[in-house]
Amino acid sequence: MSETPSQSATPRLADVAVGDRLPSASYPIQRLNLVMYAGASGDFNWIHWNERVAKAVGLPNVIAHGMLTMAEAARLVTDWVVDPGRLIEYGVRFTKPVVVPDDDQGAMVEVTGVVAAKRDDGCVEVDLTATSGGVDVLGRARAVVRLAD
Amino acid sequence: MALNREYIGRKFVSERSYQVGREKIREFASAIGDFNPAYHDVEAARALGHGDLIAPPTFAFIPAFRAMTAMMGDPELGLDLFRVVHGEESFSYERPIQAGDDLEVHSEVEDIRASGHNEFVTLRQDLVTVVGELVATTRAVIVSRGTALQEG
């Protein structure tokens, strides 16, 4: 489960400095999560649930939807700002797949975030990393949030 | 087989609008394991100043993906879906998507370029309510593996 301590109030712009680290978090992804995500998102690509097809196209095993990993990384930021509506920009590159074996553990996605910039418009840029099995699975992951005055 | 460059600049509007419902927001948020009250509890969302449940940021990809799939299946583009990989995704929000929104997807193929063995399609999609309010813009880079014509 997430190690992020529950937070009750949005951080204030004045209290945040470049280089501040957000509480990091680990998000487990099991096959069940992929089935749920496929149904919820409408993305039924076979490589996200069928081992035979995944291996036939050269993957080591079933892989998570990139958009699921992107959603988990966003959560680090939305948990930090409390109101998810404060997220105004968010982008990632999908660099490596998150491989999800069919066992009781599945995969773990570890997410970290650091305040990269405070902008003139009062928004804060957060650089994110996401790794699974020690491999970076997202690149150039950045979120922009509007903090409390 | 390289992708059809005549597709650059082409625009599409979704055939049907996407009606955002509370239960779909809850289902999606649960699927990503996110129990932020703003996605599940209408009163909590209203206490934050929203009109109804709001959707997680990447929910924007659901209507965008639906519109994208229709384009990617067009034989005229020449995309082999078994070679397709999602390369990049970004979102900018005018406001969060919320329950009750009725969204059209306005898509534009911004670019198709080759790099190495692969081709890259950049697709911009505006999510606009049926009454014309821009809610969010998404940009996706779709990678077509191994389809670039080799130089020399």
Image (spheres, grey):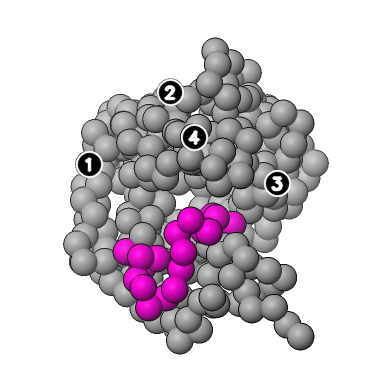
For disc 1, the neighbor class at 10 Å (few under 14, some 14 to 19, many from 20) is some
- Residue under numbered circle 3: A127
**Along the line of sight, which residue is nearer the eye, A122 or B61?**
B61
For disc 2, the neighbor class at 10 Å (few under 14, some 14 to 19, many from 20) is few
Element on which disc 1 rests: loop
> Could you tell me which residue is drawn at 70 percent across and 35 percent down?
A131
B33 with respect to A69 (left or right):
left
- Spatial distance from mark 2 to mark 1, Cα to Cα? 23 Å
Asked whether residue B75 is drawn in magenta, I would say yes
**Along the line of sight, which residue is nearer the eye, A6 or B75?**
B75
Element on which disc 2 rests: helix
Pair 1/4: label in front = 4
Q: Where the N terminus of chain A falls, by quadrant?
A: top right
Element on which disc 4 rests: helix
Q: Are marks 2 and 1 in contact (CB under 8 Å)?
A: no
- Residue under numbered circle 2: A32
- Residue under numbered circle 4: A52
The chain identifier of the residue carrying mark 2 reads A
Amino acid marked by disc 3: Asp
> Could you tell me which residue is drawn at 45 percent across and 59 percent down?
B81
For disc 3, the neighbor class at 10 Å (few under 14, some 14 to 19, many from 20) is many
Boundaries of the magenta span: B70-88
Pair 2/1: label in front = 2
Element on which disc 3 rests: strand
Location of residue A121 (image quadrant)? bottom right
Amino acid marked by disc 1: Gly
